[in-house]
Each structure stands twice: as C-alpha cells, then as structure tokens.
C-alpha cells in the first residue's frame, strides 16, 4: 500500500512538471518532428531551418510519446550542433500559447518546411 502511494506521488509530480508551459531557453530551439527513426531517435526540423537528429532521453522514453507533427524543444549538444535531445513536447493548447507569446513566425516557418 505504501509503495503504491509513493508511485502515485512521483507520477503526479512528474505529470504536473510536464504539463506546465515552458519556452525554449539558452541552448534550446523550437522544432517539429518530421520522422521517427527508431531506437528513441527522431528527425526534427528546427526553427533555424536545419534538419537535426534528436534523441529522446531514457528518463522520458516511456513517459513521452511522440509522433510526426509534434512540436518539441530540442536541447542542442555542445560538441555537435547537428544533434540534440528532446526535452519537452508541446500539446495543441501549448502551441496556441506559443503563438500568443511571439513564436507565431517560427511556427509558421516550421509548418512551411515540413
């Protein structure tokens, strides 16, 4: 019984952290998933127009499900700017909030690329 409470506590904490709205920070870029490559890797078109291979870290693999067309935040690697990690997925309501906060041009550009 106590184990179930602990699991539910961590699950609720994780869900609330993933549901809060966030903007791309320093070293992060807005992107759109265009293809699933397998083994937790995705082909992502980024706001700067480059196509990058991004991986889904192990801590998010079973909790975050992605498909082509999803908007994500990609944290670029320091040693290889052509690759990165997917750190956040935007829901549909979050995309509308992004447009209101000044990312409308970036979203339109991503839609025109893909």
Image: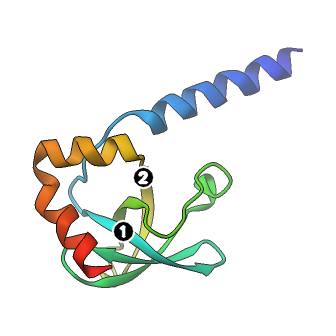
Residue that badge 2 annotates? 88
Task: Give the x, y percent position of residue 51.
Answer: 33, 84
In depth, the one of 99 and 4 nearer the eye is: 99
Where 99 falls versus 58 (above or below)? above
State which quadrant residue 21 falls in: top left
Q: Which residue is mark 1?
A: 32
x, y (%) of residue 43? Answer: 45, 80
Q: Is residue 24 left or right of residue 54?
A: left
Find residue 35 and report its horizontal and vertical position in percent.
Answer: 50, 79
Q: Residue at x 55, y 61 (%)?
A: 66
| Dot 1: element | strand
- The image's mark for residue 91 is none
Q: Is residue 47 visible?
A: no
User: In the current view of this chain or complex, which residue is farthest to the right?
Assistant: 1
Q: How many marks?
A: 2
Q: CA distance from mark 1 to mark 2?
A: 11 Å
At a point 11% along the width and 62% down the height, the residue shown is 105
Quarter occupied by the N terminus: top right
Q: Is residue 35 visible?
A: yes
The C terminus lies in quadrant: bottom left
Give 44 or 110, whichever is nearer the viewer. Answer: 110
């Amino acid at each position: 019984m106590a184990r179930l409470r602990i699991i539910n506590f961590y699950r609720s904490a994780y869900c609330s952290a993933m549901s809060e709205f966030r903007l791309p920070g320093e070293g992060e870029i807005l992107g759109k998933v265009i293809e699933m490559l397998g083994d937790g890797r995705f082909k992502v078109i980024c706001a700067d127009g480059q196509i990058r291979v991004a991986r889904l870290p192990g801590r998010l693999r079973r909790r975050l499900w992605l498909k082509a067309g999803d908007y994500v935040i990609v944290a670029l690697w320091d040693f290889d700017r052509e690759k990165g990690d997917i750190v956040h997925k935007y829901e549909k309501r979050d995309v509308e909030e992004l447009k209101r906060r000044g990312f409308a041009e970036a979203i339109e550009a991503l839609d025109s690329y893909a």
